[in-house]
Image (tube, grey):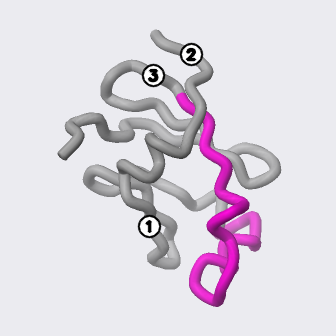
Amino acid sequence: MRTIKPIKVKPLDDYFLEIEFSNKEIRLFDCKPYLNGDWFSELLDKQKFNSVRISGNTLEWVSGQDLCPDCIYDNSNRIFIS
């Protein structure tokens, strides 16, 4: 099990998230591939998408959707190391 976890999240345009991880990396995560189906398609509403927050070791939206921290890290691109 990986010990890297998200510590800050910022929603961006075009359904991207800028995420800072506990290892000081800032990574860009594209949510568009996950916005299919009844459950995640609710996040196409920008107000709901922008409600993303840190919840424990992962990201969660106010309507209950969440993503596995390993999925977030493995499927994001590093843009900065602080």
Looking at the image, which residue sits at the far right? Answer: 14
Q: Secondary structure at mark 1?
A: strand
Q: Which mark is residue 81?
A: none
Label 2 crowd (10 A; few <14 / some 14-19 / many >=20): few
Q: Quadrant of residue 59?
A: bottom left
Q: Is residue 28 magenta?
A: yes
C-alpha span from label 1 to label 2? 24 Å
- Residue bearing the label numbered 2: 80
Task: Please state the horizontal and vertical placement of residue 25, each as a whole percent of the image.
Answer: 45, 22
Looking at the image, which residue sits at the far top? Answer: 82
Start-end of magenta stretch: 27-48
Principal secondary structure, stretch drawn in magenta: helix
Tag 1–tag 2 contact (CB < 8 Å): no
Q: Amino acid at mark 1?
A: Asp
Task: Please state the horizontal and vertical placement of residue 37, each as a whole percent of the image.
Answer: 66, 85
C-alpha span from label 1 to label 3? 21 Å
Task: Please state the horizontal and vertical placement of residue 49, each as a whole percent of the image.
Answer: 65, 63
Q: Amino acid at mark 2?
A: Phe
At x 58%, y 61%, the residue is 51
Observer-nearest of 69 and 52: 69
Q: Secondary structure at mark 3?
A: strand
Q: Quadrant of residue 6?
A: top left
- Residue bearing the label numbered 1: 66
Tag 2–tag 3 contact (CB < 8 Å): yes
At x 72%, y 60%, the residue is 32
- Residue bearing the label numbered 3: 25
Q: Earlier in the sequence, mark 1 or mark 2?
A: 1
Q: Quadrant of residue 2?
A: top left
Q: Is residue 33 magenta?
A: yes
Along the horizontal axis of the image, is 33 left or right of 65?
A: right
Q: Amino acid at mark 3?
A: Glu
Q: Earlier in the sequence, mark 1 or mark 3?
A: 3
